[in-house]
Image (cartoon, helix red, strand yellow):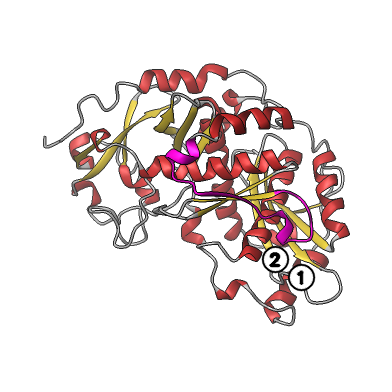
Amino acid sequence: MRVRGRQGSDGALPGFRDAILADLRSSFAAHAGPQEAEQRLRRILPLCRQARITRVADLTGLDRIGLPVVQAVRPAALSEVTSLGRGLVMVEAAVGAIMESLERFFAESIPGTRVFLATADELGLTEGLFDNLLVPAGGANWRKKEIPWVAGADVSSGAAQPVPFELVHTCYTEPPPARDGLFTRTTTGLACHTSAHGAFLHGLFECIERDAIARAFVTHGFFDRMRIAPSGLGDRVDYIRSVAGVCGVSFGLWLAPSPTGVPVVWCQSIETGPGEPILALPTEGYAAGPSIAAAAASAMLEALSARAGAISGARDDQSRGHYRRSTDTLVSMARQLILEGAPAMPIASAEAPVVADLASLMERTLEAGLGPILAVPVGADDETGVHCVRVILPGATPFSILR
């Protein structure tokens, strides 16, 4: 068996898994308040220099809405240079922007000593385990190819699980790193938090979200049948709607079909006021959460932050086609979908948690066939307590292929 650099690569995994499962049965915490967000911001600011984040910018004033949007800029990034954060208060948005930028920093900086070369057959990998995540028509005989791997953990069983390094790192260069090209590039499941448990939870929710949105893309009549009414979705949703509504921005909300039963909301926002809009095309946000109300609020804030990102003109992934005029046919169709679409379903008890704790979230994920639930400790900073984790659900539907 020809494996290099594997020794010692999984020594920290038992403690990593223990940290993830420390609050397994604890109820999901309520949304962090401004004071907690302020403390978190102070903790993570020193990491900006280490990660070469050169600017943390307030984009709020570029749009007319006024809900906080913050952009973190890391010019030397090997994936997206800019990251966006949003929230109802500025510190919340700043923490989100910095954490998103740190995710990519840690995933670009995994030490080579943790990476080893092997074939899937040499490792005795379960047949078909990662086949769902291969690039289309690019995985013929991939199990016999020597590729880089990194040690991860099956969180449910506790067993060590080698994971293709390409599914973990974010060195998205052209040409790609040597031996890359088998798996789809994506940041799905990559998350930073001030605890390993928090990072894992965030990453798992994101994996469930992306799977549900990918399924929505191929669900016949999705926009006609799955629209939900925005009323009754809690104080956060009501506040976002009222602030945006004054500025002539309207929302459409749809419940995406997750096999886990976890609430996943797809939001589209568009300007409907008089005159030429600042941004004619709709912007989208997606979110999974313990309740429909939580998912809806997060998706709406993401859609609004996408507006500010587009208006700033600094997004790496947006081309000229994103900036259209209100007279375009495509814009007219989008406005019709959001404003004149199918009748919305009323949602009873939208604020009540559907998923109470991490134990039930993991159970639902496995029962839905999305597992096993794999986690890789990507990086950590002892001084600030920031942890970066990559969560991978091999049974989930890849979102980026369908986009």
Q: Is residue 228 above or below residue 378?
A: below
Q: Is residue 329 above or below residue 51?
A: below
Specify whether 371 is left or right of 238. Answer: left
Q: Considering depth in this image, is 301 or 97 the residue closer to the camera?
A: 97
Magenta highlight range: 47-68
The residue located at (15%, 35%) in the rendering is: 4
The residue located at (19%, 49%) in the rendering is: 145
Is tag 2's residue or tag 1's residue first in the polypeptide sequence? Answer: 2
- Residue designated by label 2: 282
Which mark, by number, is residue 335? Answer: 1
What is the quadrant of residue 377 in the picture?
A: top left
The residue located at (54%, 28%) in the rendering is: 194
Q: Position of residue 192 (x, y in %)?
A: 51, 36
As helix, strand or loop, the secondary structure at mark 2 comes to loop
Specify whether 233 is left or right of 41. Answer: right
The residue located at (42%, 52%) in the rendering is: 77
Q: Is residue 97 above or below residue 352?
A: below
Q: Position of residue 389 (x, y in %)?
A: 45, 34
What is the quadrant of residue 348 in the picture?
A: top right
Counting labels gives: 2
